Image (cartoon, helix red, strand yellow):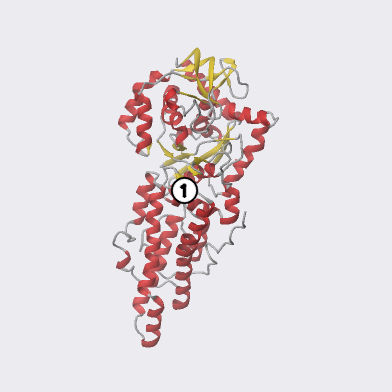
């Protein structure tokens, strides 16, 4: 089965921050998990390089828009390996292949009769590149996201007949209640649709930085339609000489809540107008907040993911983002929060569990995992390991990344308690002193090593670097998911340096 997952594409008007990393890591966790399940996965990310936000940012710097795009796009591309994103392709909307395919699809929508010429007047936020309705405005006619005054604009342009798709979108939402998740975002999108759809601008007449309309070169395609089409256009040229559209479309989109309207309303309508199947599903996540606001370069409240990775490592960043903030909601993050999660959970709970388990197998069984049955005490109960792999599958099918991680972490803590309950060192002493307790020690050590293997496989999508090192030490060549007790003992474990070594305190500001 194919699984196509996408991130939003990111504006190149500034360098990447943690908010960009967040969306990408979320998509990467799902892509990695689906590969573990044997799915045929394609994972797309990239940059959105046209439109007014980029043109204005370039003008302020005394640059041409192309110069700014070429300067900043590499920073986003470089972010991907730094956060261990396993994307299959990185698209830039200035790619000539993308621009050509956009013109082809927009021309098709025109030829099918879904476009007309007209005039528009409304409130416009240049940083959102979006016309706002009265109900969407903040206090004092401001953009609620960027906290800047909106502008009143009147334009003669080409329109997309969004209103013609009112009934089809209502039917789509009625038939597919999981089309948009979480449920609150589904309700928000449906409410927008049921409020009555109005036709929307397809082009902008006063911009030169964009893809020209094929039938009217005096105008460029509205940046949102140009950008949304990347999810389709990338499949046509991501691999030389091969069109992957039939193999992978439709997509599962991971997006932020600020672009819900475009993805959950405009996008399916535009796909229907162009003769494409609507997306498989989309998951709308909230904002990572600092000082009570969404991270934004324009607000000056960002965490630099490169700095975080330099100090804590990519695994710690990936883990923290989905442990600290429930995926789908807004939540506050901080540098202090990273350090606390790193030390208490990654280093102490998980890292120490791995070190102790391998050390005890090495000390008490000469490095060979005993061949024994799993301890029934670890199977049942709210934090038992029986059926954990299936529970995680079900949660990640719904993109519930935080809930899945909580399920796994409850078992990390269960294994730590199990060590204290069974006290393998005492069992080893009894065995040495009295010649007894050997079978019990075998069962305990096998259960610890096997439980650790299963957890490492389930956590691999979240913390792949640490996962690979631990699985190698456990002599586990496979990276697929596994049920507790599915592998017998007999393998020889290796040594493992600390998975999450102690970090130095941050220097005082």
Q: Is residue 305 visible?
A: yes
Number of marks present in the image shown: 1
| Image vertical order of residue 1 relative to residue 344, above or below | above
Query: Element at badge 1?
Result: helix
Q: Quadrant of residue 451?
A: bottom left
Measuring from the top left, give residue 236's x and y in whole percent. Answer: 53, 32
Going 30% across and 67% down the picture, which residue do you hit?
Answer: 377
- Please give the name of the residue rendered at 60% of the width and 49% of the height, measured from the top-left corner: 306
| Residue placed most toward the observer, 199 or 431 | 199
How far from the left and from the top, in percent, is residue 486? 36, 62
In the image, residue 153 sits, relative to residue 70, either above or below, namely above
Residue closest to the far right = 62
Q: Residues within 10 Å of mark 1 (few under 14, many from 20)?
A: many
The outermost residue toward the front is 140
In the rendered view, does 104 fall on the left or right side of 411?
A: right
Location of the N terminus (image quadrant): top left
Q: Nearer the viewer, residue 381 or 152?
A: 152
Give the answer, above or below, for where 241 lies relative to 359: above
**Residue where numbered disc 1 is placed:** 29
Q: Residue at x 36, y 48 (%)?
A: 395
Where is residue 425, by image quadrant? bottom left
Residue 427, given in percent of the width and then of the height, sits at: 37, 79
Which residue occupies the foreground of this view, 376 or 14? Answer: 14
**Position of residue 178 in the picture relative to residue 243 (left or right):** left
- Give x and y (percent) for residue 455: 42, 59
Asked whether the viewer can see residue 476, the reply is no
Q: Residue at x 67, y 30 (%)?
A: 60
């Amino acid at each position: 089965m194919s699984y196509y997952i996408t991130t939003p594409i990111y504006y190149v008007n500034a360098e990447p921050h943690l908010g960009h990393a967040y969306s990408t890591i979320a998509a990467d966790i799902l892509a990695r998990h689906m590969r573990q399940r044997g799915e045929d996965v394609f994972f797309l990310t990239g940059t959105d390089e046209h439109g007014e936000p980029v043109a204005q940012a370039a003008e302020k710097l005394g640059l041409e828009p192309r110069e700014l795009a070429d300067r900043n796009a590499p920073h986003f591309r470089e972010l991907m390996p730094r956060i261990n994103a396993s994307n299959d392709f990185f698209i830039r909307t200035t790619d000539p292949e993308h621009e050509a395919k956009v013109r082809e699809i927009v021309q098709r929508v025109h030829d099918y009769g879904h476009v007309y010429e007209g005039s528009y007047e409304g409130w416009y936020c240049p940083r959102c590149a979006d016309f706002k309705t009265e109900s969407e405005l903040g206090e004092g006619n401001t953009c609620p996201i960027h906290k800047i005054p909106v502008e009143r604009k009147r334009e003669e342009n080409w329109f997309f007949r969004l209103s013609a798709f009112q009934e089809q979108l209502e039917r789509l939402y009625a038939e597919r209640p999981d089309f948009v998740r979480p449920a609150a975002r589904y309700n928000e999108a449906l409410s927008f649709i049921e409020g009555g759809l109005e036709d929307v601008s397809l082009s902008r007449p006063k911009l030169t930085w964009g893809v020209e309309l094929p039938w009217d070169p005096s105008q460029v395609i509205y940046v949102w339609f140009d950008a949304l089409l990347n999810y389709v256009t990338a499949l046509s040229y991501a691999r030389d000489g091969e069109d992957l559209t039939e193999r992978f479309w439709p997509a599962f989109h991971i997006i932020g809540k600020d672009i819900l309207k475009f993805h959950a309303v405009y996008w399916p309508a535009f796909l229907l107008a162009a003769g494409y199947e609507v997306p498989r599903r989309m998951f709308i996540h909230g904002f990572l907040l600092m000082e009570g606001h969404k991270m934004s370069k324009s607000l000056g409240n960002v965490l630099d993911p490169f700095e975080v990775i330099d100090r804590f490592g990519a695994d710690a960043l990936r883990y923290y983002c989905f442990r600290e903030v429930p995926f789908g909601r807004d939540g506050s993050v901080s540098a202090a929060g990273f350090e606390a999660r790193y030390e208490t959970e990654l280093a102490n709970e998980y890292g120490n569990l791995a070190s102790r388990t391998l050390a005890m197998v090495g000390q008490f069984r000469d490095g060979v995992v005993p061949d024994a049955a799993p301890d029934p005490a670890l199977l049942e109960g709210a934090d038992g390991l029986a059926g954990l792999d299936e529970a995680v599958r079900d949660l990640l099918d719904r993109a519930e990344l935080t809930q899945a991680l909580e399920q796994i972490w409850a078992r990390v803590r269960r294994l730590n308690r199990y060590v204290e309950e069974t006290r393998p060192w005492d069992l080893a002493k009894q065995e040495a002193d009295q010649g007894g307790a050997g079978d019990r020690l075998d069962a305990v050590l096998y259960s610890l090593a096997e439980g650790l293997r299963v957890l490492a496989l389930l956590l691999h999508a979240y913390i792949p670097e640490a996962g690979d090192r631990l699985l190698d030490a456990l002599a586990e060549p496979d990276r697929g998911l596994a049920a507790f007790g599915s592998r017998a003992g007999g393998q020889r474990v290796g040594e493992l340096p600390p998975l999450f070594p102690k970090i130095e305190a941050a220097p005082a500001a």
